[in-house]
Image (cartoon, grey):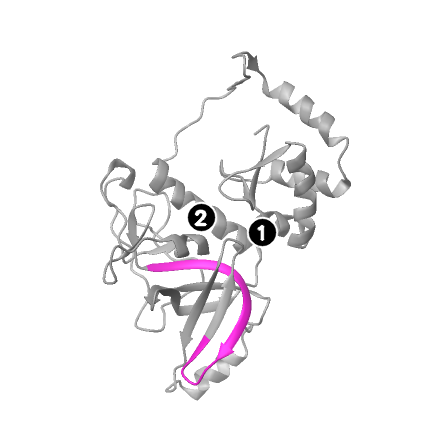
């Protein structure tokens, strides 16, 4: 894990598999400072931040020379995971179009014309980046002619698909820290009030859900069980995470989810592709 520069429980070593970077060195973690949620910027802009592509596209930049900001905090280096939609090779660079389900961004990796032949032979023996394959990107967000791209220090294929889930959860945790502050303990045994102010117990919700589930397809039931039993934040799970957990295509997950959404068993949270179980 990377030290993101806030009072954290993470270690300061990078566990993503990147030992240094092209384009002049690795990532430097900022020193822990006061909580950003308390109004002071504790996020060092030179740290590497896990993000979704939507966060990249929505990042604010007051003027061309200003730092990009997400959740009000500046950042320089980013890391994200996505599926390669296309690969375009030019004499000086390779451009990848990467899609993570929240958006698409171009990733440019410059070709090192002075690379050692022995190193090139070693690189050729490693897993290769291919269209429709998943990749991990580390790099710097840049803008040119009002179009954003990421200049990649490192881009490598994903060999363990659990890394997709880990990344999305990590990006969510950092986002929640900056928008809501440090996590706090939730009271046990909370009850949800109905429109008349009467307390409705979690058990009653479960009973109602069980009744609705009796009318859904086996596929929808599998999607429900995955959403209910998988570790997640209070924002639920993204469709890509559900598909990875189930080992199924995203298109099939959408079919099951549509049944559950129409019955009000699950609901959308941060976007149309992220869902949570109503009882939770």
- SS under mark 2: helix
Q: Is residue 256 magenta?
A: no
Q: x and y percent of residue 261 in the render?
A: 64, 37
User: Is residue 69 or residue 203 the one in the foreground?
Assistant: 69
Residue at 39% of width from left, 58% of height from top?
14
The residue identified by callout 2 is: 170
Tell me which secondary structure the magenta stretch mostly adopts.
Answer: strand
The residue identified by callout 1 is: 240
Q: x and y percent of residue 22 in the render?
A: 36, 73
- The span picked out in magenta is 77-94
Looking at the image, residue 187 sits to the left or right of residue 196; the answer is left
Q: On screen, 149 above or below 187?
A: below
Q: Is residue 92 magenta?
A: yes
Quick check: can you spot residue 154? yes
Would you call the spot at circle 1 few (<14 residues within 10 Å), some (14-19), or many (20 or more)?
A: many
Q: On screen, 204 above or below 246?
A: above
Q: x and y percent of residue 74 in the render?
A: 28, 52
Q: Nearer the viewer, mark 2 or mark 1?
A: 1
């Amino acid at each position: 894990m990377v030290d993101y520069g806030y009072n954290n429980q993470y270690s300061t070593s990078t566990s993503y598999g990147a030992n240094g970077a092209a384009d002049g060195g690795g990532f430097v973690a900022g020193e822990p400072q006061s909580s950003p949620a308390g109004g002071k910027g504790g996020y060092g802009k030179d740290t590497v931040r896990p993000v979704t592509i939507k966060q990249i596209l929505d990042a604010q930049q007051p003027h061309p020379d200003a730092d990009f900001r997400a959740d009000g905090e500046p950042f320089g280096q980013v890391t994200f995971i996505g599926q390669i939609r296309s690969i375009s090779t030019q004499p000086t660079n390779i451009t990848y179009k990467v899609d993570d389900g929240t958006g698409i961004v171009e990733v440019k990796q410059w070709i090192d014309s002075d690379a050692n032949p022995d190193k090139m032979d070693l690189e050729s023996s490693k897993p290769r980046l291919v269209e429709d394959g998943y990749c991990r990107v580390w790099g710097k967000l840049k803008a040119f002619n009002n179009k954003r791209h990421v200049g990649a220090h490192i881009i490598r294929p994903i060999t363990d698909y659990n890394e997709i889930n880990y990344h999305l959860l990590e990006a969510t945790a950092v986002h929640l820290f900056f928008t809501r502050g440090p996590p706090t303990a939730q009271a046990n045994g909370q009850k949800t009030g109905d429109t008349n102010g009467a307390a409705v117990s979690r058990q009653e919700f479960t009973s109602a859900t069980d009744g609705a589930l009796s009318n859904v397809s086996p596929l929808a039931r599998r999607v429900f069980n995955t959403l209910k039993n998988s570790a997640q934040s209070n924002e639920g799970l993204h469709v890509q995470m559900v598909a990875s957990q189930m080992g199924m295509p995203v298109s099939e997950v959408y079919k099951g989810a549509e049944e559950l959404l129409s019955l009000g068993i699950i609901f959308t949270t941060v976007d149309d592709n992220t869902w949570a179980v109503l009882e939770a």
